[in-house]
Amino acid sequence: MNNIEKNLTSIRAAITTAASACGRSTESILLLAVSKKKPADDIREAYACGQRDFGENYLQEALQKQHELQDLDINWHFIGAIQSNKTRSIAEAFDWVHCIDRLKIATRLSEQRPAGFAPLNVCIQVNIDHEASKAGIDLDAVPELALAMSTLPGIRLRGLMAIPAPREDYAQQCQAFARLADALASLQQQGLDCDTLSMGMTQDMEAAIAQGSTLVRIGTAIFGERP
């Protein structure tokens, strides 16, 4: 097997093991291959191994890859910071957006989603550890933004996304992810049709899955170190 095929096999096995350990099915967890800074050929190779969902951080880079890979049935996820002048292109070119932290951006995406397209799947980004270097809103601001976004016709609020501060201790990783899971449960109790916890990367995937992650974002462990 080549490296990408081998790496995907290893990651899928790790997801299965983590899911089994907490009594979950592997099918309840989506693997998002983060392909930023990697060439289109690497994405094509991963696609040939059965991977269908790919995450990109940089709009122009992503649009070029989409052009090169337009023959493939890929689910494209935008996971980077969103500038207001980029919302139209994102609304037109992606299936998912994971990083919304302002109603203005959500509204623009809704208004600019092309007619005839399914609503854009979106997640609210939560700054779970109040880190100045990261985007996202505080947990206590989630209900108000979620309720406002749930009324927008061009998007579908699927859930929450977070990137906790790095922690080596498994129990501490679990505590951070549990806060996001509790926030999603609260939205569900309010009647919002949310089903997604976008949380967990290579170093903390097991803890995220144990706390209910439905989507893990894995890059380096699949594609290798970025340039």
Image (cartoon, helix red, strand yellow):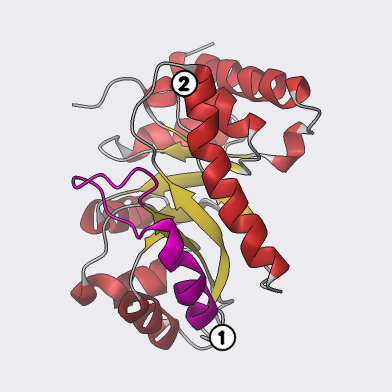
Residue at 40% in and 31% down:
219
Identify which residue, 204 or 16, lies in the foreground.
204
Q: Residues within 10 Å of mark 1 (few under 14, many from 20)?
A: few
Q: Identify the residue at image location x=63%, y=44%.
A: 214
Give the CA distance from mark 1 to mark 2: 35 Å
Q: Earlier in the sequence, mark 1 or mark 2?
A: 2
Instruction: Measuring from the top left, give residue 110's x and y in whole percent.
Output: 44, 82
Secondary element at image label 1: loop
Residue type pointed to by label 1: Gly
Q: Nearer the viewer, residue 120 or 52?
A: 120
Instruction: Report the quarter where the N terminus lies.
Output: top right
Indicate the position of residue 197 as horizontal and vertical percent values. 57, 49
Camera-nearest residue between 90 and 106: 106
Q: Is residue 81 left or right of residue 97?
A: left
As drawn, 32 above or below 183:
above
Tell me if 133 is positioned left or right of 8 in this view: left
Q: Is residue 227 above or below residue 177?
A: above
Residue corresponding to mark 2: 4
Q: Which mark is residue 116?
A: 1
Residue at coordinates 56% horizontally, 33% vertically from top-left? Answer: 208
Write down the quadrant of residue 111 in the picture: bottom left
The stretch drawn in magenta includes residue 134: yes
Magenta stretch, residue numbers = 127-149
Picture residue at 37% right of the left edge, 52% below the top? 79
Say what amino acid the circle numbered 2 marks: Ile
Q: Quadrant of residue 77?
A: bottom left
Please tell me which residue lies in front, 2 or 182.
182
Q: On screen, 1 above or below 118?
A: above
